[in-house]
Image (spheres, grey):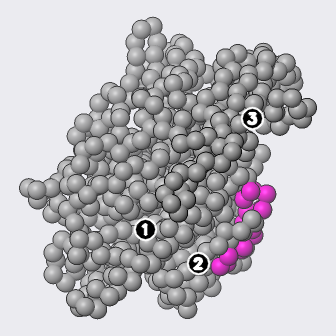
Amino acid sequence: MKNKYFKSLVITGALIGLGFQAQVQAQTQQELEKIRGGYDLNKLEVLRKNLESKTSSEKQEALVLAKKNGWKTQIQNKDGSFMELQRVVDGKPIYYTTFNVDAAKSTRTNHLNSGGSLGLNLMGQGMTAYVWDAGIARASHQEYDGAGGSNRFSVFDGSSSLHYHAAHVIGTIMASGVKADAKGMAPHSKVKGSDWNSDKPEATAAAANGMLISNHSYGYPFRDDQSGQVQLPQYFFGGYINESRNWDEIMFNAPNYLMVVAAGNDGNDNTANNDPTGGYGWDKLTGHATAKNNLVVANALDANIDANGNLVSVSINSTSSEGPTDDFRIKPDITGNGTGVYSTYSNSDTAYNSITGTSMASPNVTGSLLLLQQHYKNLNSGNVMRAATLKGIALHTADDAGASGPDAVFGWGLLNAKRAAQAITKKGNESKIEELTLTSGQTYTITVDSDGTSPLLASISWTDRPGTANSTVNSTTPVLVNDLDLRVSKNGTTYLPYKLTTPTTSAKQDNNVDPFERVDVSGASGTYTITVTHKGTLTGGSQKYTLIVTGITGTPVACTATVPTGVSTTGVTSTGAVVSWSSVSGATYDVRYRQVGTFSWTTNSVSETSTSLSGLSASTQYEVQVRSKCSSTNSNYSASVNFTTPSVTISYCTSSGNTVYETGITKV
């Protein structure tokens, strides 16, 4: 058995230790390098070490205090849920707990599978999901060794404690269907599992090694099962706390990685809401469920779906935890079906059971999103979506449920995997899915033609920088760092995005809290202008984001390779710079740069209208040029734009206290 609290994962140039090598069976080394190619691996390693040290010290402190105060370190509750002590906050023991209950398949994922109406044969082949949970699944279960091939479930961190909850979650993602009713969303995929101890440092290491998606069907329990007393600090309810921020930091530094989280099963517990000193909305989301960049999943009853995959009706399960967050972000983000889900259990190789809760809705969504990532990769030369793109497509195409527009019960609605897959299929024709970068002070504008029949929907989605954690009860201060703005306009009329106004109502107005915005234009016809801007100054000098548009004409965009104009540089540092230029309709681009006076160019191919240069030398003059590319022709390169990187600034003190400056180094 592993030491649960002192694990060490070492990032190497190729793979990560402690069993991560087995991932190559599901994704090639070349694919992994593509995924993590744009990551700062040194920064991720520093983050992993910091989180590992903090997690270990918090755990040890909790164990000491548990012994002193007579707290249980593990609790098996009467309702079947399992709790394990993690840390102590404000003198209170903080546990992780499983979220138990049932999930069916109302998310139209069957339309993506073999035999589905879309003809895509998406079964999760070559894809891997990660699961952190109360324990691990039984690797020898017949559902993990079926049609998708042998040994599809493995443990990556040395965990050895079997747990029924983990087995059920994992089966919901990848069970092969030996028993047809138990077939998972991605029945040929692989899953790597771990217990929930040291989840953050382990996830950092896995993300650095190319992990794309993970499932977390656990969180903080409201009450002590024995006393019935609320055991969380009041500011945890709806608050952006250190736990929320830590996960946002991991995802920001690994922008292809999406964390999927169960909202919780406290929908019938109004303790926080009834507390006169607290309560905002329903105030039932805590911990990592209040982060910005993840996808938080609510639990619906079985939906009524017609033969074509259209939603007829759906109701929320009353136990599903509602939001929003204290700064009024739309959380939960989306809804899956987690009621009465039949899946694998851990007590034998042929064990099954039906249970209910957001714990089951979450893997229902995780497995479905894994197929959408697979579909995109199949159509885009092995390239995967950014996490913000995957999340954005899911929210953009969800079926509205409950109140009109987004709310804090269903989020953006019930996941519609069929519609999401169709948007990916039609990319570049009847839909736009563009991964872009907005530089500080830049405005991005395009025009689109409505198809005249469908609503015109435009969305932007981005992985935001981690905000400032707080311990103020019901702090309404927005935790959004880079605030992008989306507008759609035509003939002097401007259409605005949604923003929550109460937990069950929204309005179309400026949104300054959510890292996802959607503008809906009903009855659209003709040509519309889509504009993306930002407020203030962008932290970091730029922000990657994804623009998604549906309901547009299928007429191909004419591409004429003309020399790009407006080439400029911003955010110049001693080692890097951001290059931007004006868009050429339908084109991709080559950006080349070199040190002035040298002959050899470095060339990058990009599909956006800006790119970041890295690895530059300090105090050096460079020149950069851009050309556009259509299917059969290239333009000439633009005229050179020159820029000079500044010198490195270093200061240090001698033993006598005087500041010493080295020759050639800027003085400070």
**Badge count:** 3
Q: In the drawing, what numbered circle is on residue 557?
A: none
Bounds of the magenta segment: 17-33
Three-letter amino acid code at disc 3? Thr
Q: Give x and y (percent) for residue 144.
A: 63, 76
Mark 3 Cα-neighbour bin, 10 Å: few <14, some 14–19, many ≥20: some
N-terminal of the pair, mark 2 or mark 3, is 2
Q: Is residue 15 left or right of residue 273?
A: right
**Marks 2 and 1 close (CB-CB < 8 Å):** no
Q: Give x and y (percent) for residue 427.
A: 65, 34
- Picture quadrant where residue 74 is located: bottom left
Q: Residue furthest front?
A: 656
Where disc 3 sits, the SS reads: loop
For label 3, the residue is 620
For label 1, the residue is 217
Where disc 1 sits, the SS reads: loop
N-terminal of the pair, mark 2 or mark 1, is 2
Pick the residue in front: 81 or 193. Answer: 193
For label 2, the residue is 8
Residue 216 seen from this side: yes
Q: Nearer the viewer, mark 2 or mark 3?
A: 3
Residue shown at the point (51%, 24%) measured from the top left = 441
Q: CA distance from mark 2 to mark 1?
A: 24 Å
Three-letter amino acid code at disc 1? Ser
- Residue 32: say if magenta: yes
Residue shown at the point (81%, 33%) measured from the top left = 595
